[in-house]
Amino acid sequence: MKPSEETHILALDVRHSRIGYALFSGPRQLLDWGASAVPPHCSNRTHWIRQRLMPILRHGSPACIVTKQRRLAKLPRNAGGKAILDAIGSAAVERGIPMHVIGRDELKSAFRFFRARTKDEIAWAIVGIFPELLLRLPPKRKKWQSEPHAMIVFDAIATGIAYCHRPPPRE
């Protein structure tokens, strides 16, 4: 199914202790976005994520779920992220929703038109597409600062945009 044919697309950015999401209706309409942090005292991450994800799946009725490809170098450190992705995958299978993975190269090429290479430049490009996000745009990060928590939402939106603008698969 081509991205333009799908009604709703749920884009996710999964980290060890956080998940960002963006729900699209086609490539130009952003219906909902947000982020959730797994509480540090949570003993069952997968159950907690499923509980947070189910209302989005139920009310958003996505035709597909899109995530970014995880870097293998971060795999051991991001074991919690793997558990979260597994929980999302099982919830998708239960509801019959296909999952797609976007590679880093696809993400970068989607924003080449905007001459956006860094996360901050991509976030500014996203604000150009969806001006309603301007107030949520985190300040540009200095090298010594940690990433702002709001950036996970922009990463999820970037993933959705990259999926919508990827070339159709060859048959």
Image (spheres, rainbow, N blue to C red):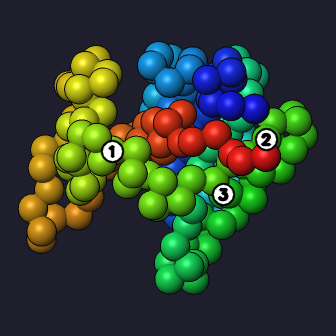
Q: Which badge, 2 or 1, is on the more N-terminal residue? A: 2
Q: Secondary structure at mark 3?
A: helix
Q: Looking at the picture, which amino acid does disc 2 mark?
A: Pro
Query: What type is the residue that disc 1 sits on?
Result: Phe
* Label 3 – label 2 distance at C-alpha: 17 Å
The mark lying in front, picked from 3 and 2, is: 2
Q: Is residue 133 above or below residue 161?
A: above
Using the image, determine if residue 81 lies above or below residue 119: below
The residue tagged 3 is 84
Q: Residue furthest front?
A: 171
52 and 104: which is toward the camera: 104
Q: Residues within 10 Å of mark 2 (few under 14, many from 20)?
A: few
Regarding residue 171, the answer to whether it shows in the image is yes
At 30% from the left and 24% from the top, the residue drawn is 129
Q: Is residue 149 left or right of residue 1?
A: left
Query: Residue at the spot x=61%, y=74% of the render?
Result: 79
Residue at horizontal 48%, vertical 54%? 106
Which quadrant, please, contains the N terminus? top right
Is 22 above or below relative to 38? above
Q: CA distance from mark 1 to mark 3?
A: 27 Å
* Residue wearing tag 1: 111
Q: Which residue is mark 2?
A: 98
Query: Horizontal placement of 99 versus 72: left or right?
Result: right
The Cα–Cα distance between marks 2 and 1, rounded to whole angstroms, is 24 Å
